[in-house]
Amino acid sequence: MTKQELRKASKEKRAAISPERKKELDLAILKQIASSGVFQKASSLLLYAPTAGEINLLPLVKLAHKRGIPVGFPKCNTENTTLDFYILEPGQRLVRGAYGIPEPSPDAKPCPIDRRTLCILPGLSFDPTGGRLGYGKGYYDRFLAGFPGVRAAAVYQGLMVKEVPTEPRDVPVELLFTEHECWDCRKDPRRASSNHKVLERIGTGFRTARKWTAEKLREASKPVRALSAAPNEEDEQQVIAPTPPTPQHAPLLLVLVTYVLLLVSRLIDSWITNPALEPFIVILLQLLIFPVPALLFLWKFRPKGYWKTLQLNPIGTSKLLFLLFMLAVMITGGLLTEIMTGGISALAGNFTLYDTFVARASGGLQLFFLVIAYCLLPAVCEELLFRGILCSEYRHCGATLSIFISSLFFAMLHFSFPLFPTYLFLGILLACVRYATNSLIATALLHFAYNLFCLFGQPYLSSFYVHAGSNETFVFCLTVLFLLFSAFAAGEARKIYHRLAKKQHRPVTVVPLRALPRHLFSALRSPVTAVCIALWLIVAALNLAK
């Protein structure tokens, strides 16, 4: 039987199942999946939205969310015929996508994938070796070619056949969940005597289906108390709806609130009469400007498990050399951009925070609070907002746009035309570090070290400039150091990504170059974006006029 003939026969056989029988079979399959070890140990779950006649696995979404693991649904890219999975957060709904198939909303984030990810594929029919009969588009086969996790599928026992016609590009599944059991396709079913009964039931339909014993039902129902009834249309409507509920403007509103609070803090700076109190006031203001709005944003608009997407991961020792080289790139590159926009004279003067609070040299305990106020706290707060939340919010647009958008708003935070290129450059470097290391802690540490240099490195920089003898020699030395350390950092980054490639890890979403303008417009298509840009232009123009 050819694939076309088998597809037609499978669809007819599936359509012949009565709705009542389908509910019973779907519930039995759900219990098999929920009681399996791969589901209990999964780090993330990849599902599909059922179309007419397909097995309804949507109740697994609630179970996965209760366990705190992300659930991803596929999006079809019809331009390059690829498939990517995006997270469906608790409370979110699917929207109609390509081919009329429900998919996550446009602002959904990519689902993390690793070796413990469980992917349950749709299909019309399967055989005991894992051969899968799909719908002929090949999306899943292309996705599975680089998928490192567990490949599984759910199928009615009556839709299994002895052999599915396959091609070299077809990727088999490893596990099959039927209404009776979980079948390991990696074993040779013709030699596995313990499972020989499965072969006897293949192709015989639902008449040979055995009844569950009370003991097995109790065991399977322990992890699936949420499945008190068979899946029905109400279960599907809880997940599938025409519009996404998560506000598209939420992350931009967070940025706008931060801008407004920062501008208000400038008024408070003019009231400070005792310089000794300034570090303490700066600490308090930063806590009010950054963490408080960020925590309110996370509490109001994002689920509890959102913290995992911020990548608060420890820094591996293999990445320390990369961070050291990137620090040198930030220092030399930041100095060069300042010279290009403001001249050599731009390097003179004291270190200022947001062009408002001036760091005044001191000693003893006062120096400790000075470092916290002007180095540590800005690094932690800014990284949480820009490389943490903003990079996560726009990661679905691809790594390139995620880096650019977060860096753009980071540069605008300082309300300065001359300093805009410098902070845009630094923001891009920090965002690249976040993607390379998969650690927000790494970017915060790097940012802190850069702030330390800006606070205490000015005397050494002046000394170096004096010994250089001329502006041209000074700029030449900086350029050589910048290029040298950039090459070293690129080499270390290559090693990091080489290790990730060995693990078949896909840390970012890849967006075609021609699609970047469309994604950028979609991401920033908000009146809040216009307000943020207008506010920056007005304040930056006023600062320049002073």
Image (cartoon, rainbow, N blue to C red):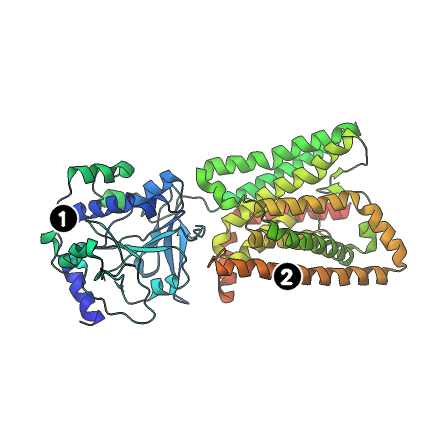
Is 54 in front, or is 437?
437
| Residue topped by disc 2 | 490
Seen in the image, is 97 located left or right of residue 215? right
Res 11 visible? yes
x, y (%) of residue 233?
A: 23, 45
Using the image as rendered, state which of residue 335 and residue 43 is in the foreground. 43
User: Residue 414 placed where, x, y %?
Assistant: 68, 45
Say which of 169 and 8 sits in front: 169
Using the numbered discs, state the Cα–Cα distance from disc 2 to disc 1 in whole angstroms: 59 Å
Out of 437 and 228, give the one closest to the viewer: 437
Residue type at mark 1 is Arg
Point out the frontmost of discs 2 and 1.
2
Disc 1 designates what residue?
21
- Could you tell whether 142 is left or right of 209 in the image? right
Who comes first in sequence, dot 2 or dot 1?
A: 1
Q: Relative to residue 11, is residue 134 drawn left or right? A: right
At mark 1, the secondary structure is: helix
> Which residue corresponds to the image point at 73% horizontal and 60% vertical from the top-left?
482
Q: Residues within 10 Å of mark 1 (few under 14, many from 20)?
A: few
Label 2 sits on what residue type?
Ala
Q: How far from the left and from the top, in percent, is residue 513? A: 52, 66
Q: Residue at x 20, y 53 (%)?
A: 194
Quadrant location, the N terminus:
bottom left
| Residue occupying the point 27% across, 61% down | 130
For residue 355, which quarter of the picture? top right
